[in-house]
């Protein structure tokens, strides 16, 4: 067997562990290892060394740490984005609640005046006032609750803890 063949086998053994081998290379290497004790021994030692290295190195593997950091950053950005998407709804809700409080006296007078002009019994125009008055704020509150509830449901489906594995 030529020296080149053993050298090639050595290169392939190293590459196998780093990036994997194409099918034909793998076949060639397997055939060589079967017929060459020295290279087979080298392959065994390499695999053994890598295996023991891996058990020690994995927890501090910088690539994995970097990946986890990138994921954490992505997740943080995702959460920020979701809050930002929710912000217009909050503003609309607060606005509608403030408007409700500010306009109450005026609309109460307006409904009272209309009720009297139309000769409606007081409970009728008062009910109308209540309905009209509370509608925007109620709709806003329901929309907000819906968004919050949906967000929580989504989290419950593993979005919260699943980001590390996925
Ligand atoms: Zn060999």
Image (tube, helix red, strand yellow):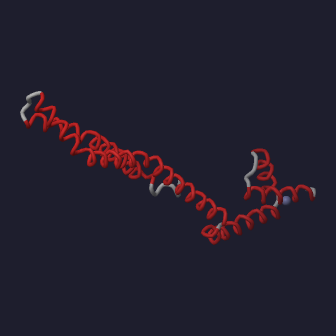
**In the shown orientation, is residue 125 left or right of residue 27?**
left
Find residue 66 and report its image quarter.
Answer: bottom right
Residue 21 x, y percent position in the rendering: 75, 50
Q: Residue furthest top?
A: 118
Q: Residue furthest bottom?
A: 56
Q: Which residue corresponds to the image point at 18% horizontal and 38% vertical from the top-left? A: 129
Residue 15 x, y percent position in the rendering: 78, 56
Q: Which residue corresponds to the image point at 8% horizontal and 36% vertical from the top-left? A: 122
**In the shown orientation, is residue 10 left or right of residue 101?**
right
Q: Which residue occupies the foreground of this view, 81 or 90?
A: 90
- Give above or below for 49 relative to 151: below
Q: Residue furthest left?
A: 121
**In the shown orientation, is residue 165 left or right of residue 153?**
right
Residue 82 x, y percent position in the rendering: 47, 49
- Give above or below for 115 relative to 69: above
| Quarter of the rendering occupied by the N terminus | bottom right
**In the shown orientation, is residue 142 left or right of residue 72?**
left
Find residue 131 and report its image quarter.
Answer: top left
Find residue 10 and report its image quarter.
Answer: bottom right
How many numbered marks appear? 0
Q: Which residue occupies the foreground of this view, 41 or 53?
A: 53
Q: Which residue corresponds to the image point at 12% horizontal and 29% vertical from the top-left? A: 117
Q: Which residue occupies the foreground of this view, 147 or 95?
A: 95
Q: Which residue occupies the foreground of this view, 81 or 29?
A: 81
Q: Which residue corresponds to the image point at 54% horizontal and 54% vertical from the top-left? A: 77
Question: Ligand 1 falls in which quarter?
Answer: bottom right
Residue 141 x, y percent position in the rendering: 30, 46
């Amino acid at each position: 067997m030529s020296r080149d063949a053993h050298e090639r086998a050595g290169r392939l053994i190293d590459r196998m562990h780093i990036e994997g081998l194409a099918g034909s290379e793998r076949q060639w290497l397997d055939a060589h290892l079967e017929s060459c004790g020295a290279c087979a021994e080298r392959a065994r030692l390499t695999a053994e060394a890598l295996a023991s290295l891996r058990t020690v190195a994995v927890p501090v593997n910088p690539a994995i740490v970097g990946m986890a950091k990138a994921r954490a950053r992505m997740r943080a950005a995702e959460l920020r984005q979701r809050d930002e998407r929710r912000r217009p709804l909050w503003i609309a809700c607060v606005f509608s609640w403030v408007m409700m409080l500010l306009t109450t006296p005026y609309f109460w007078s307006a409904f009272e005046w209309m009720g009297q002009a139309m000769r409606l019994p007081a409970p009728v125009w008062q009910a109308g006032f209540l309905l009209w008055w509370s509608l925007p704020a109620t709709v806003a509150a329901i929309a907000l609750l819906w968004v919050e509830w949906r967000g929580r449901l989504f989290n419950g489906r593993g979005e919260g803890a699943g980001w590390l594995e996925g």
